[in-house]
Image (cartoon, rainbow, N blue to C red):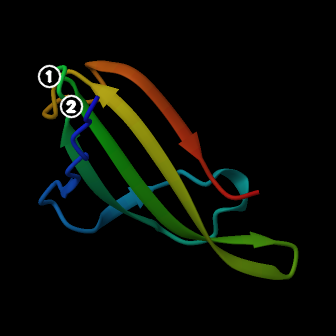
Amino acid sequence: MTTAAATWTPDGRGVLAGGDVGGDHQSTEAFSVRYTWQRPDGLYALTTVYTYGERSGRQHRITTLTETMVCRDLNDPGGTEVWCATASPA
């Protein structure tokens, strides 16, 4: 069985303000970029990568959070969400 490779493409919006995605330790504005792929079953897969500064005590670091979603409509991903998960480094 041959499976075609996914072709992820930037969604064309560029880098955007990402809001407050990092919780209590987020200390800077988050910025995000999104990639999309139309799956063979007609659904859409989205990967949104958020990057922001975090502060814990006297330590500062840059953190990346990745959100992966499957939806029915790219114009309303949250309203047509089928599945979603987030992951960030420990």
Please name the residue shown 42% across and 22% down the image: 83
Residue 44 against residue 90 in the figure, above or below: above
In what element is the residue under mark 2? loop
Looking at the image, which is closer to me, 31 or 86? 86
Q: How much space separates mark 1 and mark 2, taking CA atoms?
A: 5 Å
Query: Image quadrant of residue 14?
Result: bottom left
Please name the residue shown 33% across and 21% down the image: 81
Q: In which quarter of the image is the N terminus?
A: top left
Residue farthest right in this picture: 57
Please name the residue shown 17% across and 27% down the image: 40
Looking at the image, which is closer to me, 56 or 81? 81
* Side of 30 relative to 55 (left or right): left
Residue 20 — which label? none
Labels 1 & 2 near each other (Cβ < 8 A): yes
Residue 23 in the image: state x and y as whole percent. 66, 50
Residue type, mark 1 in image: Gly
Query: Image quadrant of residue 32?
Result: bottom left
Characterize the local packing of mark 1: few (<14), some (14-19) or many (20 or more) Cα atoms within 10 angstroms: few
Residue position marked by numbered label 2 in the rendering: 39
Residue position marked by numbered label 1 in the rendering: 42
Residue 68 against residue 18 in the figure, above or below: above
